[in-house]
Amino acid sequence: MEDVIYIKVRQTMCAVKQDNILYMEKTGRQITVHVCEGEDICFYGKFDTLMPLLDCRFVHPHQSYVINMQQINRLGNHEAVMFGGDRIIMGSRCFGKLKRAYDRYITENIHSRQEIR
């Protein structure tokens, strides 16, 4: 997969590195890409169009969010806390979907990571 996605914002094309995306949030028809560094990017679009452009780090557990699992600091209490400090709160069913995807992602992609108890 390509490490960069291109988003058209008004008359401008923006290149966004997938590594820099914390999560995406949809409100109505507007999507806000929350990034690690720099300004958030807002544009009109659909998650169905974006998901095929993103790699295996990204999960769409809730109709309003696409989350970069590599940027999750911790999961618990029906919320994902991102490394940037943002909290994404969701219901039981959506949180369960996120937790299962995150557990699978960690198991399959981060072999050298040691769990500390």
Image (cartoon, rainbow, N blue to C red):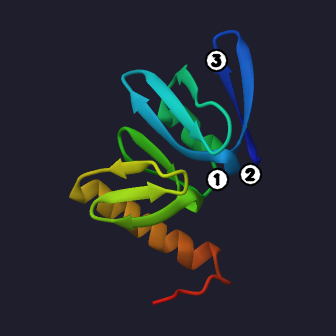
- How many residues crowd around disc 1 within 10 Å: few (fewer than 14), some, or many (20 or more)? few
Q: Earlier in the sequence, mark 1 or mark 2?
A: 2
Q: Amino acid at mark 3?
A: Val
Residue 60 coordinates in the image, percent (x, y): 44, 48
Task: Please tell me which residue lies in front, 40 or 63.
Answer: 40
Instruction: Find numbered disc 3 in the image and state the secondary structure of the residue it sits on.
Output: strand
On the image, numbered disc 1 is attached to which residue? Answer: 55
Which label belongs to residue 77? none
**Left or right relative to 103: residue 56:** right
Q: Earlier in the sequence, mark 3 or mark 1?
A: 3
Which residue is depicted at the point 23% across and 53% down?
91
Which residue is depicted at the point 77% across and 47% down?
2
On the image, numbered disc 2 is attached to which residue? Answer: 1
Q: Amino acid at mark 1?
A: Asp
**Of marks 3 and 1, the one in the foreground:** 3
Instruction: Find numbered disc 2 in the image and state the secondary structure of the residue it sits on.
Output: loop
**Left or right relative to 30: residue 50:** right
**Left or right relative to 12: residue 55:** left
- How many residues crowd around disc 2 within 10 Å: few (fewer than 14), some, or many (20 or more)? few
**Quarter in which the C terminus is drawn:** bottom left
- How many residues crowd around disc 3 within 10 Å: few (fewer than 14), some, or many (20 or more)? few
Is label 1 in contact with label 2 (beta carbons under 8 Å)? yes
Which residue is depicted at the point 69% across and 51% down?
19
Q: Earlier in the sequence, mark 2 or mark 3?
A: 2
Which residue is depicted at the point 55% across and 24% down?
42
Q: Amino acid at mark 2?
A: Met
On the image, numbered disc 3 is attached to which residue? Answer: 9
Rendering quarter of residue 98: bottom left
Residue 113 coordinates in the image, percent (x, y): 63, 82
Q: CA distance from mark 1 to mark 2?
A: 6 Å
| In the image, residue 113 above or below residue 76 | below
